[in-house]
Image (spheres, rainbow, N blue to C red):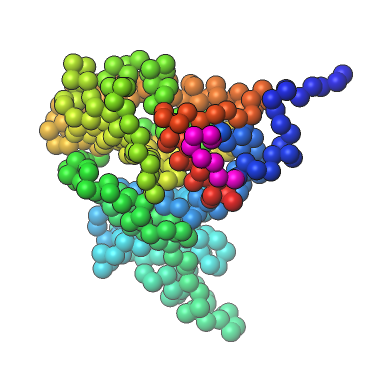
Amino acid sequence: MLLMRPHNQEPRTQMTDWLAPQTLQTAHGLPAFVYTDPDIAARERSMFRRTWQLVARSDQLAQPGDHVVEDIAGLPVLIARAPDGTLLGFHNVCRHRGGPLAIACGAGLKQLRCHYHGWTYDWDGVLRSGPELDALVDFDRAQVRLPAIAVVQWQGLVFASIEPEALFDALVDGIDARVASALHEVRFQRRVSYVAQCNWKAYIDNYLEGYHVPHIHPALNRLLDYRAYRTECLAGYALQSSPLDASESFYGLGEALYYQLWPNTMLNILPGRLQTNRVVPLGVDRCRIDFDYYYAPDVARDAAKIAADQDLAEVTQREDIDICERVQRAFASGSYNTGRVHPTREQGVHWFQERYRRALA
């Protein structure tokens, strides 16, 4: 039986120019295979190791000995508050035979001691001691060191990068001036995590445009003023904003601000509420989205408002996951290659995909 390729599906071997920069007015989106190819997913791991990842809340690392165990693109990492108050990050991998220095997030970490064989490091990451090390010939402990990673604390959040390609300040430049007071007062309330059967980029693409809101999110659409919906693209992030509809908003007067920090962190800010999202690839066609909810003190005392906020977020998230999973199946079907990017409604998608092209190139 002769199998025919769909007429609009260009063979991947002929697609040599998809990494070339594109202007907004004439741009096409990333080709479908970029969302389905395991080789592309493998190449992305180095990109994630060069970028800033949201790894913790500041309150998780408030006291000496507090520590967080995370994973960045397959690399186990440990972030800890040292006895002198310094915030430090290391590969969570002993230099002896790869054992973990910490197994779970917690408090009271007094030393960096491997759970496998007991090798112990000082807070500079240098090997200090271990069982029967004197038996090792020509062994200089001072040359054995845990690789450090970059860690920064900002607005109650902790970010880390294994090999940062840019200073963290460049990532968030301008955000403080606009929302510092709103971020400063909020406190963590809960985390909800979702697994979506789609490539992480499909989820990010969807987040970065309000073009779909009237069609996919009826409840959210009533809350926002779609006619006044705006997108601004800066060096480290894209910002979508919209005034709230006073007749529908249980948040009060103000605006909705949706920040997408390159490459996979979101800050969703509404009056009295911050929601952070981190999108974690789990495979070429699966990702996890961690939602952390934060509220200002007056909202934190209002159970009805919190319930309304989280009910709306749950409905919106389920709608987003459903459409992203449908798009992922279309990408994998062979029917679709790439389509045009809308120049006034999908600037954020274009911004993200241009950053992505440069990162992989």
Q: Is residue 60 visible?
A: no
Residue 191, horizontal then vertical, whole percent: 33, 35
Please tell me whether the stretch drawn in magenta is mainly helix, strand or loop: loop
Question: Magenta stretch: residue 21 in it?
Answer: yes
- Res 232 → quadrant: top left
Residue in the image at 29% along x and 25% along y: 228
Residue farthest toward the front in the current orientation of the protein? 25
254 left or right of 125 in image:
left
Residue 32, horizontal then vertical, whole percent: 62, 32
Question: Magenta stretch: residue 64 in it?
Answer: no
Q: Nearer the viewer, residue 11 or 184?
A: 11
Q: Is residue 230 above or below residue 70?
A: above
Residue in the image at 55% along x and 61% along y: 98
Residue farthest toward the bottom in the current orientation of the protein? 138
Q: Which residues are magenta?
A: 20-27
Q: Is residue 113 above or below residue 353?
A: below
Residue 205, horizontal then vertical, whole percent: 47, 33
Q: Is residue 129 visible?
A: yes
78 left or right of 327 in image:
left
Q: Nearer the viewer, residue 197 or 202?
A: 202
Q: Nearer the viewer, residue 62 or 23?
A: 23
Residue in the image at 55% along x and 24% along y: 327
Residue 192, horizontal then vertical, whole percent: 36, 32
Residue in the image at 44% along x and 73% along y: 126
- Quadrant for the N terminus, please: top right
Residue farthest toward the right in the current orientation of the protein? 1
